[in-house]
Amino acid sequence: MSKPLVLVKDLTYRYVDGTEVHIGGIPLEIHPGERVVLLGPNGSGKTSLIKMLLGLMKPSSGTLEVFGNKPSKDFSAIQKRLGVVLQNVEEQLIGPRVVDDIAFTPRNYGYDIKQIEREVDTLMKELTIEPLANRLVHYLSGGEKKKVAIAGALIAKPDLLILDEPFAGLDPQSQEELVGLLTEISVKKDIALLVTTHDLELVPALADTVYILSEGKMLMKGTPAEVFQRPDVLDSARLHVPAIYSLYIELQQRGYPIEIPARVDQAAIEKLLNLLTQKPIINYKSINGRVPKLNV
């Protein structure tokens, strides 16, 4: 296996008042092109970890490497290979217009203006935000701001894109669009992703690897299907298996020859319905007018 872009192991950060943030348990690794989702409830340590990865907080102990460097010491060595989208994108939208904001970083690096214009145009097409080019960024919708922030993070062609709670505040349709966009970007541009969230519904379509963080401890690492088959671990982290995956797990436990899909899309639903139709072993019983019970 390739050398990881990111390695996190047994970190401790100590605030000036003596309060400590500890992130232990299973080491976190991110490899080239890998899409990693870090799951955890609010207060689990996700944002503290992101800040340490960005060099904004220096751990007092443990192992933290990004591209083989220590972020708090060598951030200049990693910044061009790292793209970041903050939870509150307002904090990173700098340019007055969309085109100005996307072009800010390469202009700051002194790149050729014509080249910058071509790359900004290409990114806006890929992210379908061309109509927003001359709009003032602070008048955009939440979903539009997220796309502009992603474009600004991608303009330097990073090897790793970090997104902290990118789905927060978006409606379901915008969330689905963003998941599709991030997946396409990762595959097409061979960019590794680290996405923090507490929304399990979106994980199967986005992640290759999932880590569960709770109260400063990495409890589990696995594929989405592996993680969803451990409701005990999810419960301990105050997370819950999405209802549709609970159905798959229940059917497996009751003897159905069915695998949990990486993503429950229309094709997966059709396959499930076909299986249930071909093997009609579901009987409905009504007891004293109560909701029918499924016997499989």
Image (cartoon, rainbow, N blue to C red):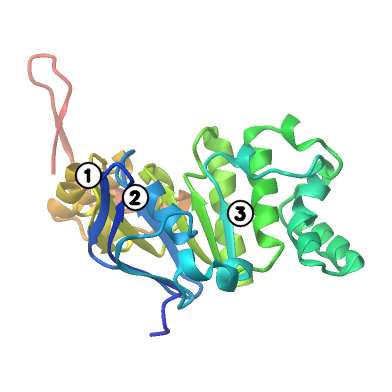
Q: Secondary structure at mark 3?
A: helix
Q: CA distance from mark 2 to mark 1?
A: 9 Å
Instruction: Tell me the tag on residue 14.
Output: none
Point out the residue furthest to the top here.
Answer: 289
Q: Secondary structure at mark 1?
A: loop
Q: Name which residue type carries label 1.
A: Ala
Instruction: Tell me the tag on residue 237.
Output: 1
**Which picture quadrant has residue 18?**
top left
Residue for badge 2? 39
Q: Name the N-terminal-most of marks 3 and 2.
A: 2
Q: Name which residue type carries label 3.
A: Leu
Residue 105, position in %: x, y?
73, 59
Residue 53, position in %: x, y?
45, 61
Specify the quadrant that holds the N terminus: bottom left
Q: Choose mark 3 or mark 2, whichever is in front.
A: 2
Q: Are marks 2 and 1 in contact (CB under 8 Å)?
A: yes
Q: As rendered, which of 152 and 123 lies closer to the eye?
A: 152
Up-down relation of residue 171 to residue 55 (above or below): above
**Residue 124 visible here:** no
Q: Residue at x 87, y 68 (%)?
A: 115
**Residue 49 visible here:** yes
Residue for badge 3? 181
Point out the residue furthest to the bottom here.
Answer: 1
Q: Name the N-terminal-most of marks 1 and 3.
A: 3
Q: Name the N-terminal-most of marks 2 and 1.
A: 2
Q: Residue at x 34, y 38 (%)?
A: 42
Q: Name which residue type carries label 2.
A: Leu
Q: Are marks 1 and 3 in contact (CB under 8 Å)?
A: no
The local crowd at label 1, few if under 14, some if 14 to 19, many if 20 or more residues have their Cα within 10 Å, is: many
